[in-house]
């Protein structure tokens, strides 16, 4: 499963080689990739969306709008969803438009919105392929970081023999596997991530908790795993579906209270290279937990609280030379000062600030907006993005510290 969890968007263009896209989908899926397929209008003449949607187990999109109600297919969302875009087969027409900024179909709109690596696999007749204009266009794409999986030589649909055949699906998939293998930047790293809230029991039915959903920590675990790391996730009480999507080789340690989270972290921290403290741990816990449900008697009710172990702080005191610890701070006021104080007092190498004053940032939602501080100054500021993208940005930043 060399492409474990990779989100690959396969764009199919109009070419007789489009039939090979079915095999590409199968091979990518076999290697553990999640595949979505988009097609240019002319590709529809060569292979049906039904074939590709059945194999990919996802709907296939081929126009900006879908269905009788004209539902909008958001090209930006699709482009951001992908970890990698594979244009196979890429026709002369599409290659030319990619170079010259012509955006007259969904595939091209996705390409122009993409932030991830794009691979292009040309397929055309030999004379078209060696035409100076095709070669110049392919060169320009490569100069702009598009990865070329070159056409192969052999018999062409025209009956002529020469270079222009779509690379064999096995070769395309092997090329991508090698590319991802080489770019699995966390391949040798062990990463522990804390996530979610903690629940501090008051009695058998009540607890002190907070609004953390665990989404940020789980996104970090998933992205770290995709980047090749060996991941341990220590997770407070979060919804089952959130954890159900995680691959089996992420070790998940489910806990409930801050004390339990501390114990779970303590037992695995020694051999970690990177620890990210994304959990919202309750600072205080009831001193006494009633064994039976507390009854309503007086008009007021007081619970005596004691401090929970400060997991990050205790771990920070024993941090090894080769370990990197990164904390989070969710603040409502004095954001920068508070974040920097936490970074210092807990011996973090960096801290990720998310502010409650930024709409769409912090707790519960699917998005976040962060500033990373390192060396006591802002080192990276994101825009509002999905927690998935934010996780990737945080991990990319951590690799450099
Ligand atoms: O889970 P989501 O809904 O996706 O929301 C994500 C999040 C907002 C919870 C997350 O992005 C975040 O900001 N987590 C930290 C919340 C916070 O403000 O923590 P804190 O200020 O209490 O603690 C600072 C740091 O110390 C954090 O790294 C925290 O994990 C750690 N800590 C705190 C207390 C404690 N007892 N043990 C700890 O390890």
Image: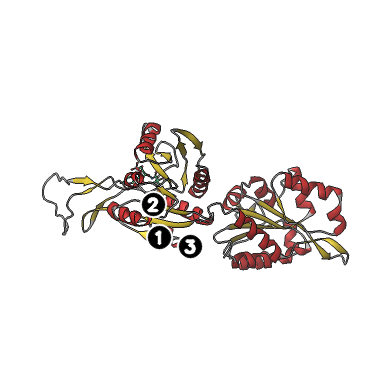
Above or below, 306 against 13 in this view is: above
Above or below, 14 against 352 in this view is: below
Q: Which residue is drawn at 16% across and 56% down?
A: 290
Mark closer to the chain start, 1 or 3: 3
Q: In which quarter of the image is the N terminus?
A: bottom right
Above or below, 364 against 155 in this view is: above
Residue that mark 1 sits on = 252
Mark closer to the chain start, 3 or 2: 2
Q: Which one is in front, 264 or 142?
A: 264
Q: Sort mark 2 into few (<14), some (14-19) or many (20+) by Cα contacts within 10 Å.
A: many
Residue that mark 2 sits on = 194
Dot 2 lies on which element? strand
Residue that mark 3 sits on = 247
Using the numbered discs, state the Cα–Cα distance from disc 1 to disc 3 in whole angstroms: 10 Å
Mark closer to the chain start, 1 or 2: 2
Q: Which one is in front, 233 or 318?
A: 318
Q: Measuring from the top left, give residue 363's x and y in whole percent.
A: 39, 46
């Amino acid at each position: 499963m060399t492409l474990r969890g990779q989100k690959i968007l396969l764009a199919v263009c109009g070419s007789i080689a489009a039939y090979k896209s079915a095999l590409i989908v199968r091979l990518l899926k076999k290697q553990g990739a999640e595949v979505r397929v988009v097609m240019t209008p002319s590709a529809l003449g060569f292979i049906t969306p039904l074939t590709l949607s059945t194999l990919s187990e996802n709907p296939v999109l081929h126009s900006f709008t879908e269905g009788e109600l004209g539902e909008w297919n958001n090209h930006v969302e699709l482009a951001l969803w992908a970890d990698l875009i594979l244009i196979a087969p890429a026709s002369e027409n599409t290659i030319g438009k990619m170079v010259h900024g012509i955006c007259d179909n969904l595939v091209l709109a996705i390409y122009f919105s993409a932030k991830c690596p794009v691979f292009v696999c040309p397929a055309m007749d030999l004379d078209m392929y060696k035409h100076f204009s095709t070669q110049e266009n392919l060169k320009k794409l490569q100069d702009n970081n598009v990865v070329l999986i070159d056409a192969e030589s052999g018999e062409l649909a025209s009956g002529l023999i020469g270079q222009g055949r779509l690379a064999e699906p096995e070769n395309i998939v092997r090329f991508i596997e090698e590319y991802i293998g080489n770019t699995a930047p966390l391949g040798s790293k062990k990463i522990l991530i804390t996530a979610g809230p903690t629940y501090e029991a008051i009695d058998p039915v009540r607890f002190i908790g907070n609004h953390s959903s665990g989404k940020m920590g789980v996104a970090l675990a998933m992205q770290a795993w995709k980047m090749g790391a060996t991941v341990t996730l220590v997770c407070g009480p979060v919804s089952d579906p959130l954890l159900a999507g995680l691959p089996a080789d992420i070790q998940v340690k489910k806990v409930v209270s801050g004390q339990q989270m501390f114990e779970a972290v303590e037992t695995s921290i020694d051999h970690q290279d990177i620890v990210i403290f994304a959990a919202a741990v309750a600072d205080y816990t009831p001193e006494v937990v009633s064994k039976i449900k507390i009854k309503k008697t007086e008009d007021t009710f007081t619970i005596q609280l004691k401090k929970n172990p400060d997991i990050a702080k205790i771990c920070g005191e024993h941090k090894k030379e080769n370990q990197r610890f990164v904390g989070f701070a969710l603040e409502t006021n004095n954001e920068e000062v508070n974040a920097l104080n936490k970074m210092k007092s807990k011996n973090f190498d960096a801290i990720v600030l998310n502010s409650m004053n930024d709409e769409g940032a912090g707790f519960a939602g699917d998005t976040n907006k962060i500033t990373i501080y390192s060396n006591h100054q802002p080192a990276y500021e994101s825009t509002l993005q999905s927690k998935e993208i934010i996780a990737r940005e945080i991990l990319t930043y951590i690799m450099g510290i």
